[in-house]
Amino acid sequence: MPTRSRSPLARFALPVLAIAVAGAAGACAAPALAQSVEGSGSSSVLMFDRPPTVDELREVVAPKPRTRSIEIMGGVANGAAQRPRPAEQASYPSEPAPAAPAPAKAAPRPAAKAPPAQQTTTQPAINQQAAPPEPRQQAALPAPAPEPEPAAPNAFGFRINFAFNSADIPREFQPYVDAVGGLMTQDNSLVLVVEGHTDAVGSANYNQTLSQRRAVAVGEYLVRVHHIDPQRIAVAGKGPSEPVMADPYDGRNRRVEFKPAR
């Protein structure tokens, strides 16, 4: 029987379909972009490179308290209990003074002679020093205290790619702010400070004003879209004054931060 020839389009249909399926599987298996802690000490902030979940944001602003068990060293307690008391100073009764002899009758005065040198004797004093105390038992040294863990950041932030000299939130970055709105909707007691930050490129006054405008734009978005009470949002423009990178001109210093009001 004559074989039916495939059309040129059919020859490439199966390889293209296989590549598309493999690409979709790879996209599903690819891990989400990681989050990173930037800055140091009380200025550390958890930066998200993808839209976060409400639970992830809640862990930052209201982390679970960490508890540590305190182990009482038995050696120290036992050593203190077995420590001997200091010995009290011993006291001895003094010897009674001898009775005075009766006065003798007057005798005839003998011829004058040089009186022999009288030799005085002293009795050794009674040693009333207290007995030396017994040596103390050496108490067991306590275990060295563990090194304190670095404080977890209580602020989070996004690098919203605003257009040049613009405070409009791009559409692709709105899901980041939507997560903040979801967090504040679930927790009615949460009050956040929205901070705008820039790098050091340009004048300080210009960057200060631009960071303030962008912080206000994020706060207005939360009020308009998620109906958050404006009293629960404070805004602040920081300009380039608080960089998270060693180089103040690094573009990664441009960010919007959210901190719980204390």
Image: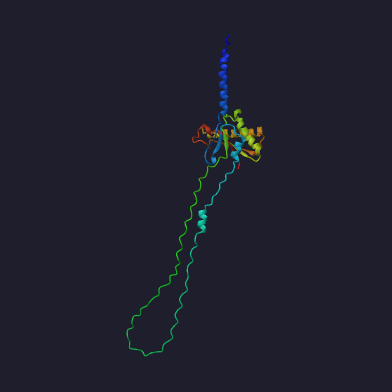
Q: How is the image coloured?
A: rainbow
Instruction: Please count the marks in the image.
Output: 0
Residue displayed at 55% across by 38% down? 45
**Residue 25 in view here:** yes
**Residue 201 in view here:** no
Does 54 appear above or below 131? above
Residue 104 rendering spot, x and y as whole percentages: 41, 87
Q: Quadrant of residue 188?
A: top right
Residue displayed at 60% across by 28% down? 172
Residue displayed at 59% across by 39% down? 59
Residue 92 rendering spot, x and y as whole percentages: 47, 72
Quadrant for the N terminus in the image = top right
Q: Nearer the viewer, residue 96 or 259?
A: 96
Residue 166 rendering spot, x and y as whole percentages: 58, 29
Residue with the most extreme top position: 2
Residue 29 rendering spot, x and y as whole percentages: 56, 28
Q: Nearer the viewer, residue 87 or 198?
A: 87
Q: Nearer the viewer, residue 126 or 40?
A: 126
Residue displayed at 57% across by 18% down? 14
Residue with the most extreme front position: 1
Quadrant for the C terminus in the image = top right
